[in-house]
Image (tube, rainbow, N blue to C red):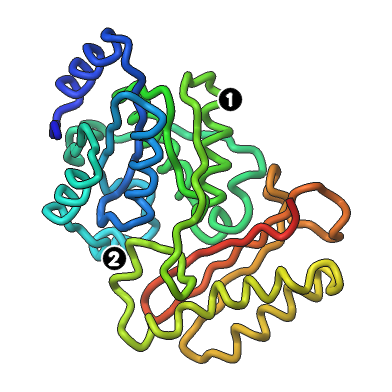
Amino acid sequence: MRVFEKISETHNFLKTVKARGLSVGFVPTMGALHRGHISLIEQSLKENNFTVCSIFVNPIQFNKKSDLKNYPRETTSDFQKLKSSGCNMVFMPSNDEMYPEPVNTQYDFGQLDKVMEGKHRPGHFNGVAIVVRKLFEIIMPDKAYFGEKDFQQLAIIQYLVKKNNIPVNIVPCPIIRENDGLAMSSRNVRLTPAERKEAPVIFQLLKQAKEKVPSLPVEASGKWIKEEFNKYPSIKFEYFEIVDMETLQPVKEWGECKKIIACVAVHLGKIRLIDNIILIS
């Protein structure tokens, strides 16, 4: 497994890979890898001749300095997992390498970033778009793989690629869950044992909400799940949104669009967790 830290060396090496007619798959990460990340690597390996993973904790997508500081960094473990997976190459740049000068780029995502995560984390998706586009320019992948747990991020990256004619095929990948249903996340390791024990209730309630479709109206479903989360004192409810899967705009009636997803964000102790479930597809 090749490891690169410099943009120019990475770009030049991958030029030689593509010159040999090999297809390149790319999995961008912020490290602290878990089985969900590895599932993306495995899918890329199946669909491409050469697979690249990046590890870069992107500072400009964090709203709070404390979140950036506390984000788990497990480089040795990450390398071992990537080697075992069969990943061909890792790109692990420094902050100065990626951002030698201040970045002021501003993207317009229409209404996609005005709801849910965008509403609660202003500027977050702009930071994501900046780093993803830069990584695409460096890696030049044919396909890039993103998990559906961050569903809004996935939608925004798809929009970014389409609007800017970036020649990358975005491949959505299903959520990978622990045996008890908790969506895998790098942040899960920061949960206390008691918090980890309670965390599966997030997906349990999402599944119960899905079972109530369409007998319980949309607005009533939102009220119901908020009341259910409020039964758990350690869980601080942030949002539950039922939205059109394409526009991410709130849905008022079950029949108004073909594909509907429910997205949730909660705080469990000091850790913020998100999840989603497709209600109608």
Q: Secondary structure at mark 1?
A: helix
Residue at 58% x, 66% y: name it.
Answer: 264
Question: In this rendering, would 248 be left or right of 174?
Answer: right
Question: Which residue is depicted at the point 86% across and 72% down?
Answer: 215
Where residue 192 sits: x, y (%)? 31, 83
| Residue 246 position (above or below residue 164) | below
Give residue 62's mark: none
| Residues marked 2 and 1 touching at CB (< 8 Å) | no
Please identify, in this view, whether the residue under mark 2 or under mark 1 is nearer the observer: 1
* Residue 5 visible in the current orientation: no
Q: Amino acid at mark 2?
A: Ser
Q: Quick check: 18 left or right of 234? A: left
> Toward which corner of the image does residue 44 lie, by quadrant?
top left
Residue 219, position in %: x, y?
Answer: 80, 71
Name the quarter where the N terminus is drawn: top left
Question: Where residue 183 sits in the image (x, y, percent)?
Answer: 46, 65
Read off the residue under disc 1.
Answer: 163
Residue 162 appears in which quarter of the rendering?
Answer: top right
Any part of residue 175 in sight:
yes
Q: Residue at x 54, y 89 (%)?
A: 232
Q: Which residue is mark 2?
A: 66
Q: Residue furthest front?
A: 46
